[in-house]
Structures are given as C-alpha cells and as structure tokens.
Amino acid sequence: MFRIGMLTSGGDCQALNAAMRGVVKGLCSKRNDVEIYGFQDGYKGLIYSNFEMLTAKDFSGILTMGGTILGTSRQPFKLMRVPGPDGIDKVEAMKHTYHKLNLNCLVVLGGNGTHKTANLLREEGLNVITLPKTIDNDLWGTDMTFGFQSAVDIATEAIDRIHTTATSHSRVFIVEVMGHKVGWVTLHAGIAGGADIILLPEIPYDVDNVVRAIKSRTEAGKHFTIIAVAEGAITKEDAALPKKKLKEKQEKKGYPSVAYELAEKIQNRMDQEVRITVPGHTQRGGSPCPYDRVLATRLGAAAADLILKEDYGYMVGIKNGNIRKVPLGEVAGKLKMVDPKADIIKEAKIVGISFGDE
Amino acid sequence: MFRIGMLTSGGDCQALNAAMRGVVKGLCSKRNDVEIYGFQDGYKGLIYSNFEMLTAKDFSGILTMGGTILGTSRQPFKLMRVPGPDGIDKVEAMKHTYHKLNLNCLVVLGGNGTHKTANLLREEGLNVITLPKTIDNDLWGTDMTFGFQSAVDIATEAIDRIHTTATSHSRVFIVEVMGHKVGWVTLHAGIAGGADIILLPEIPYDVDNVVRAIKSRTEAGKHFTIIAVAEGAITKEDAALPKKKLKEKQEKKGYPSVAYELAEKIQNRMDQEVRITVPGHTQRGGSPCPYDRVLATRLGAAAADLILKEDYGYMVGIKNGNIRKVPLGEVAGKLKMVDPKADIIKEAKIVGISFGDE
Amino acid sequence: MFRIGMLTSGGDCQALNAAMRGVVKGLCSKRNDVEIYGFQDGYKGLIYSNFEMLTAKDFSGILTMGGTILGTSRQPFKLMRVPGPDGIDKVEAMKHTYHKLNLNCLVVLGGNGTHKTANLLREEGLNVITLPKTIDNDLWGTDMTFGFQSAVDIATEAIDRIHTTATSHSRVFIVEVMGHKVGWVTLHAGIAGGADIILLPEIPYDVDNVVRAIKSRTEAGKHFTIIAVAEGAITKEDAALPKKKLKEKQEKKGYPSVAYELAEKIQNRMDQEVRITVPGHTQRGGSPCPYDRVLATRLGAAAADLILKEDYGYMVGIKNGNIRKVPLGEVAGKLKMVDPKADIIKEAKIVGISFGDE
Amino acid sequence: MFRIGMLTSGGDCQALNAAMRGVVKGLCSKRNDVEIYGFQDGYKGLIYSNFEMLTAKDFSGILTMGGTILGTSRQPFKLMRVPGPDGIDKVEAMKHTYHKLNLNCLVVLGGNGTHKTANLLREEGLNVITLPKTIDNDLWGTDMTFGFQSAVDIATEAIDRIHTTATSHSRVFIVEVMGHKVGWVTLHAGIAGGADIILLPEIPYDVDNVVRAIKSRTEAGKHFTIIAVAEGAITKEDAALPKKKLKEKQEKKGYPSVAYELAEKIQNRMDQEVRITVPGHTQRGGSPCPYDRVLATRLGAAAADLILKEDYGYMVGIKNGNIRKVPLGEVAGKLKMVDPKADIIKEAKIVGISFGDE
C-alpha cells in the first residue's frame, strides 16, 4: 500500500481542487495500491486525526470547482509550538497522526504560513511535498501560484464594471484589491482594468501625489479617475513608522479597510465625489480560470511524479515556464514582493499610470 | 426637421445605450429628417443647454456598452423648484432650452426621481416620452425595468463566488445587494445564488430569527450560511419607528452600510465568524445581459413608434410580455415593491429560505 | 413513506439540477418520510428499473451545476408502443417499475417528446407531475421553459464575439442557433447580439431578400453583416413543399447544417466572403443563468407543493409571472411557436432587423 | 513632428486595440508632437494610401474592446512581389506611401505572414517595429503572443459547456480548436477543460489509439469522452505523405473540417454516438482576457520606448517574463511549435490524457 495524506490550508482559493485532482490522477494512473487520506480543514484535520479515505473517483470532475473538497482553516505557524486550550502539542499530534496512519507522504497545498509549518514537519522527519496555492502570488521559489490569475480576472472584471459607471458620472472610484502584504493582484488587475492610479504595498505613496494625478486628468479633460489600491498599500509616512507604532496608529483609526481611509484623505484635499468598491472574498471564489487550471494540473502531475520517485521535501513550483522542485527549507519564511524597479512597473508608468510615488 | 432631445438621468445602469440605440434606429429607419440633441449629464444638460448634435452613427455599435454615452447625474426632484446657488429657476430653464431648440419631443431615460421631473415637464406642456431604467426594478407601471436582470446576474455571481469560499471554511457570509428602498435584486439574486437567508426592506426581519436559521443549519450539518441582505433591509424594531427617529438612529450608529450592522448583531449573539461582501457599484456596470438588451431594444423601438405617431406623455413599459404605454401622471411618485405575499416569496420559503420574519 | 420517482428525459439543458433541487428541498422541508428514486437516463431507467435511492443531500449544492445528475436519453414517443429489440413492452415495463416500487408520484423533467410520454403514463393511471425543460422554449402551456434564457445568453455571447471579428474584417457572418423547429432562441439572441438579419422557422425567408438586406447595409457604409439563423429556418420555397418532398430534398443536399446551405446561396448571388459559426451543443451546457435558476427553483417548489397536496396530472408552468398548473392532457403534442405577428417581431423590424420575408 | 504609421494585419484577435493603446499612450506621454497615421485594413491601407489621422483620444477607452479599430485583412506574403490585377507593385507602393507621408516609423501588429512582410519592408529601408499578435502563439522569438490566452479561455469555456452535456448523455464529443498549423491553443484549452484526448499537429495520431483510449475509459466506468482536436491535427499516416499528396487527399475528402473526418473514423470503428462542436471564429472575438491586456499593454509600452529611442527593426516579445526586442530578421519565416517532448506534454500524460500517439 502507498498511503498519501493530503490537506489544504490557509485561505481558500481557485484551483485547489484542480491541483489535488492532478496529484491523484498522476498517482493512480501509475500505481493501483494508492490510498488517499484527506484531512479535513487543513492542519486541524492532521492534528485531530479527522480524515476521510478518498478514492480517485472523489477527485474526478472537480477540475473546474472552486473551493476545496477537503475544507481549510488557518492555523497560524506561530501558534504551532504553543499548546491550544485543549493542552495538545500540535506538532507532536500531527506527527502522531502521520505515523499512526503509516503514511508514505503528506501533500500540503497552501501559502506562506502553510509552508512554514510544512517545512517544520519536514524537519521533524515527515515526507512532505507542497504545492503553491495563493491568490497573492507571494510565495518565494515560484514565478506563479495558482489562484493568482483567477483573482486578477475577478478584480479586473470589477474595475471594468466600475469603468462604465465612472465614465457616466464624474467621479473618483477606488477599487480595493486583495493581496495581503504584496501588490501582485492589484498591479496586474490595475493594468488590465485600465486603472489610472495603482497603489501597492511595495511602493509607498503620497496622497498629494494621488491628488495631483487626479487633477492632471481633470485638466486633460478626463472627468473620472479609477484607483486600484492594494489592501496592504501604505503611505510613505506610515512606511517610515516602526511596525509597532504603525499597528497602533491603524487600530486607532478604525477604517473598515484601506480604501475608506484613502477616500477620506482625497475628499479632504479636493472637492470630488469618491466611491469605494471592495470586491473582497469574491476574489478567491468561483471556478478557476483556464490559466490556473493548466498551472495547477501541471504542478499536481509533477508532484505525483516526485512522490512516485519518493523524492520528498520540496515545493513544486514553476520557473520560466518549466516545473521545478524547490527545497522546502529555501521557501519557508520568505516573501516574494513586487520589485519597484521591475520592467512591468516601468512599462506601466510609460502608459501613464501613477503609483503615487512621484 | 424632426427634433428629438434625449437624456439619461439618475444612477447609471446597464442597457441605457441599448435603449437609446433602439429609439434612434427606430426613428431614423422611418424618417430621414431626424435631428438628435443629446443633453449631457441628465437634466443638468437640459437646464444649462449643454448638448451635442448626434447622428444615427453615434448610436451604432453601442448595444453592448455599459454606462451611457450621454453621461448622467442626479438632480433631485425636490430641488427642481428651488433655485440653485446660481439663482437659476431650473424648470423654466429646461422649458427654455426645449423651446429654443424647437424640439418635437424629449426622450428621458431614468428611474423614480427622473420620472417625477419628467411628469412635471409634461405638465408644463413639453412632449415627453420616457423609458424605465433602473437596476432596482421599482418603477410603477412596468413589470420590468432594464438594468435589473444585469444587476441580478452580477449579484448572483458574487454569491456564487462566496459560495465556494463559504463551503471551504465554516463561516457566515453576508452579501449586501443594491436595490435602494426595495428588495427585487436581492430577492432574485438570493434565490439564484442559493442564499440561505434573504433580508428585504419589504419584509422586516428579527435578528433572533436570523440567528435561529443559522443555528438550525448548523444542527442539520451545514457548516456555513449565506445571507443576501438588501441595502435597504430593515429590522422589525426599526420598521416600527417614525421615519425621523429612524434616520437619527441610523446616523448615530454610523455603520458603512447595513451588512456591517447585521454582522455585528449576529456576532453579538453567537460565536461565529462573519464575513461581509459588498459588490456595490459593480452591480450597475458592465455590458447589459441579453435579457436587458432585448428588453431595452423593444422599449426603445416602441418609444420610436409612439414618437413617430406624435403620441406623447407616456412611459413605455412592459406588462405580461407585451410593450404598453403608461400615462406619466400614473407613474410618477409611485414605488413598485416586492409583495410579501407574492407567490415567489411563498416558493422561496418552500425550498427552505428564511426571510428572518418568523 | 412517501415515495417519489424522478427522471430527466430528452436533450439535456441548464437548470435541470436546479429544478430537481427545488422539488426535493420543497418535499423534504415539509415531510421527513420522503424517499427519492432517481431513474437513470430518462425513461430508460424507468423501463429497465435502473435507479438510485437518493437523499436530500444528493440534491444539495447542485443549483449551479449544468447537466443532470440523473443522466438523460432520448426515448422517442412514437417508439413507446413498439417493443424494442429485446421484446419488452416499454409502457407496461414503466408501469411495472412504478407499481413495484410503490411510488406515490413520478416527477418528469423534459420537453415536447417527454410530455407526450408523461401524458400517456398519466392516462395509464400513474400519478405524474412534470416540469418544462428545454432550451427551445417550445412547450405549450408555459410562457417560459428553463434552459431557454441560458441558451440565449450563450448564443448571444457567440454573436458578440463574432461582432468584433466582423467589424475588423469586411464579411458576412452566419451564426446558426439551436431551437429545433422553433425560433425562440434565435429571435432573442439575434436581437440581443445585434444581428442584422434573423431567420426563423416561423417566418420563411427568401435568399434574394437576404442578399438585398446585405447590399443595403453595404450601401449605407456598413461593411459587415451578421445573420442569426435558426437551425430550423426554412426558405419560402421549401416551406411550400409537402413534408415528404422537403425531407427528400434536404437529404439529397447533404449540408452539415442549415448555415452551410445559406452561405452557399449567398455566395452564389454576390461576391462576398461568408463565414459560418455553429455554437452547437455548447448552447445547452454550462451553469444555468440566474434567470433560469430562479425559474427552475420556483417551478420545483410549486411542484413540491402540488405533490404534497397529492394533486397530480399537471405540468407546472409560468404565465404572466405566476406559477400555474396545466393539465398534462392539454400540453402534450402541442408546439408553442413564435407568432410572426407578435409585437417583438414588429419591434425588431422597427430597429431595422430583416427577417428575409420582404 | 514625429510621424508614426500603424496597421494591424492578418486574422483579427483580442488585445489588438489594447496593444495600440499602449504604443500611443507611451508615445504621447513623452512627446507632444506625435502624429498617428492609422492605415486601414492592414497592408492594404499602406499600399493604397488609405489612412486616417488619429489622436491619443482615439486610442482612449479601447483597452477592453475586441477586434481592431483600424480594420485588418490578409495580404499573403507570397503575393507581395506579384503585381495585383490593378498592376500595382505592392512593395513599391508601400514604400511610396511611407516616404510620401514622411513617416518616422511604421508599427505593425500581426502574426507570421505579417512578420515576413514587415521584415521585407525593413530590408527595403523602412523603420519598422512589430508586435506579436495571434491566437495561435506560433511566433518565433516570443514566449507568448497576445490573443492566445483569450482564445484558450473561449475554447476552454466551450469544452466546459460540452462537459455538462457529455456527462448527462453517454457520448463522444469532439471539440475542434483553432490554432492554424500548431497546437498551442488546443493543448492548453484541452488540459484546462479536462479533455480526455488531445490531438495536435505536432504529435500525429493514430485513430486506433484514439478508439483504444475511448474504450479504456468505458471499461473504467466513464461513459463519455471529450476529444480536443486542433484544426491542424494530422494522422500518422497523413503525416508520412509528401505535402502535395496530402493536399490532394484532403481536397478529395471534402470534410468541412478535421473534426468531421475524425468523427466518421471513430464511428466506423465503434458503436458510439459522436457529436462535434466547432467554436470557430468566436475564439478570436470578444474582449481580451486580463492576461492579454497586461501583455499587450506591456508590449505596446516597450514598443513606444524603442520608437522614442529610434531603435528600429525589432519585434517586441516577451521571454521569461521580461520584455525584449528581437531582430525582425530572426523572427520572419519561423514557426514556434509545441515540442512533443516538452514537460507540459509529459505532465498531461501523467494525468492520463492521451495524445493518440501510443
């Protein structure tokens, strides 16, 4: 018997099911003694030994389904070593489940936090293979994560729809885009949606520059402006604060989210109606786009290939169009951010997009 | 010469361009002496005599375009008789523009407020034909307004996407749907999206009933609940307040919108993670759905027919599948609301949807 | 025990699952002794007693799923009384299965052919309730069938996409739209997609008129023409033939479908590049549109209501926005066609659409 | 004055307008003396000096529009040196127009044939910059062409819709995907749509292998099979023929397209209903997907950058995520095909997809 544990952890995103289907199809087309243990709700299922025995059939027909058939939950890495209210040592519990079930390998699909824990389990001696799942595209070691392009599509669609409203009225529209601490989704959706101003965590902005950009559009006869702002965008002023001070400041202000603060600041500086749109969790939902399905299928197939070779301890990523394995120890704890000097930023500026930095 | 003035007023919505295309195509295929005066930004253009001379060509290829090529603005009816800061008597100014241009007819596309002013202009002796435009579907005298089905499609898509996220995590999700003071969009999108609880202005709800419905789902083994709440939804308690008191109360509370208040109330009553999604203005944007394009084209064509017959003073609506003319005097000032006793509500309850009223 | 048999028959379409979900949710929310027997692949499952016992859970989460979880097949009515190669009397076999399982009622979802058989079973003494399923919208007794609006959406999308290509090149494009012997989908998708010429079975056309319409567009400076042709469209000449002669003629010609014949005829008459697009079965596939989901849910709920009242022998339809029951004997064997004199045709002509009839 | 000629040539595709917008925005944000000469219908406009003077405003708001605002036509390279029926030497005529208008540079958007002519014009001394436009993704020198991902999205959507029909009935479905002589779109859409069999020009197939794959699915309890076949797919037998013989053979057979031939062959070998879907030109139409909009905008911006530096003679492509210039002499006349040994083929086989080659 070849026993594979599988779990999806962290925020859900598109193509999780597609990726798991890829792994299982890959395993079952080569061996007929595969047993799949699907842990429920991420690491929680591994800790508390909640699982279902699944067969290839359970992974059939799920290529286009959003969400994850295993369920997911957030289990912060920093609490992994801390016993919960039930007194359970989570790491030991996970190891115990793994060994009790006599697993050959644990397949983990997740983002940044997930990878820290996956690497910890690897260090504890478990055989682990991971797949890079997140709409944020902030995982180190891979050019692309699945979920990202689907989120870009949805955020772009929101900007498109706002565009028709914006051109009919004379207004400033702010669309707040997901992406956690990085600006990948905002950058791509902003360019794709024809946003006039794009604000990213990686390029701290100055509200005065934003106002200047709006005014210069008005002077050019354009009566509306669309701003794509990343949920993690930050002003130059705030970026200069020590982390702790910044957190205190943000909590004191109590805006529902960054777009509301930005809207208020713009309205304080100019006589202009400002409207806010926050697509929110819709950006992680729905059927994965074809790009993500191909990516997830390829990564899943490559993961199956590694597992069949019993070559463990890697995240399966993509680099320059080719799938490659990246040692988990190299991935964990790193963040892949937008480089403010990247060509795509330069090109965006060439077509007149302002990043609020000058 | 046959001179037609045209304007779009109020919030923008889908199929405004489709409807205007219908009118203009209808007119120009029958007469070759038609002149179109497109007033900019709604009644404002009529007041200040801002217009463009347009030809049939300007209305070609706009069937699928969102927004309005004429621009729009909100000009509250109650301020129509009140001179603006520039001292201008708006009604007189509109009449002046109309007569100065020697218009045969004014075509007005708009919602409730717009129709009050349109009827006023009719009473003042102008030839007026109107088309029922609003995502809210709250216009009296027509079964359906264009924009409505497109808004339902977008709100449903938002609920669909939330569904995949909701099934992956164990949460309560609130999706706030547009619709002003009525619940049409929420009702239809809620049913179409498979919402478990639907809260409408027309059926005041009790938070305890909402909480009960969530708990009964949990007991039935369903770990998530989706609530579609209309932006105008109201609790039984608030519905009992005098209007003035209610307004004071709402201003004091200061939630960004109704979903935030509902979320807080649920969280105060049960230990359950609640997430909010507000698709907002995206619901009025983008390309009209095929249903709305057919409706708008039909209404536009029928308007052209009336204009060619010089039969003025009507809104062109649809009743039981057939286009019909409704005297403007009958339309203005009335609101078409969801009937709490309608079959569709009964049917929704049959499939287990809670309206929070029992 | 309350035993319900259920089957879907004929070509598949969108919202079959949504409708069944409505029925089952409606039944199970009122009674807790319901047993669902899902027959596989339509009447075939009833004939050969192939079924699965299903629970409410099997119908959960299928609201947005295309296709049918029961499978379907075409079982021509005219062969129902004819024993198959296995010598089985199909009607007796169906009755036998029904009585053997001690069913209280059989719920049948299908189109025209399906309804003939359903009515036959009713005449044979079975309790039958049906739901009107077909993209063709050709069922007598209901204003609307589910599947129709979804098919319109897909066909319209095809025309939209052809539009951008057509405007870039100078060509005639023919889009062939499904609809069997009637023109409902073509008519609505044609108007919604901005087709210049619409050819329907109900309005026989003359190719010379089609060519004339193309030329008059060219003269007006429009370099492309889009024709939406129903798969069942027919020329005046062919419409005048006796049915048998017509069939012989069509078989002799051997075009893959009607669009190919039309293209050839146009090219024979003018020097114009003609391109063909046949979206085909895609028009019956994919997730149902929100309109169809609401319709199917309402019809399903109303069916459940009738079943709970043990009021059998009806198709559940919709008339002027309200659900109503229609005796099966009135429905079977009739076709609902587009009325060439309907307002929608008149309005389409007002905006300049040619039907090739004049 | 800085005079830029611009034209789009060959089959239209998505994001042509987005790319031109990128170029023009890039030029006009840096210089205020730019004049744009838009040639109509590709090289034809350059030959016959048909052009419009365009301004930055003409390229505003076209980011999301399908097609090309300049129009396009196919002007085969092999006929460039051959005088037309009007006796005109096309190459000289193009040079004449270029010099007469005193152009600084000619910007050409097109695919393979277009690039041969563009390179010819470069050799004749014109300043040329090109952008890689084609849904086929077969241009040498760039990882990706714009139009490709949009076409993949549409073809995938078609397969998705067929999927729901296929699972409801028991059938073989063939979806014929565009791509000219290469298999890029089919490969990606096939994987994304979950096709069971993918047939590409680059991997000649054997019908017996295809039939074997279908049967092995049936044996595994799967009652339907979806085949994605490239319009240029070829059997091993035909691939072995000399080109001339092959052409003769294909003309003799006279199938409307490759899917029809494949269907017949399968039906000759097994008792199985086979249905065909040919999305056709819809694959080049409609609004570009966000991926293509970002790519086209980036390429357009980089083209503007080169033009401003007066660094001519290149196609602007993308390699490993970065924009780069490729000498036109290297690009012209080469075809980028799918490598049968590429990782993506291997991965597709791992998940069980058959390419009919073994």
Image: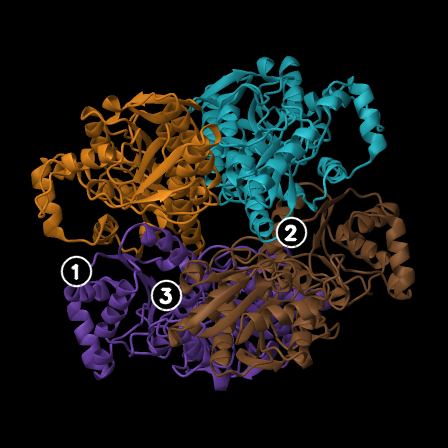
Chain colours: A brown, B cyan, C orange, D purple
Q: Secondary structure at mark 1?
A: loop
Q: Kindly identify which chain the residue marked by label 1 belongs to.
A: D
Quadrant showing the N terminus of chain A: bottom left
Q: CA distance from mark 1 to mark 2?
A: 48 Å
Type of amino acid under label 3: Met
Q: Which quadrant of the view contains residue D170?
A: bottom left
Q: Image height check: is A167 above or below B7?
A: below
Q: Which quadrant of the view contains residue B285?
A: top right
With B245 as the anchor, is B94 left or right in this view?
left
Type of amino acid under label 1: Asp
Q: Image height check: is B20 above or below A241?
A: above
Residue at 55 percent across and 69 percent down: it is D5
Q: Which residue is mark 2?
A: A281
Q: Image height check: is B202 above or below D92?
A: above
Residue at 19 percent across and 41 percent down: it is C47
Q: Which residue is mark 1?
A: D271
Q: Residues within 10 Å of mark 3 (few under 14, many from 20)?
A: many
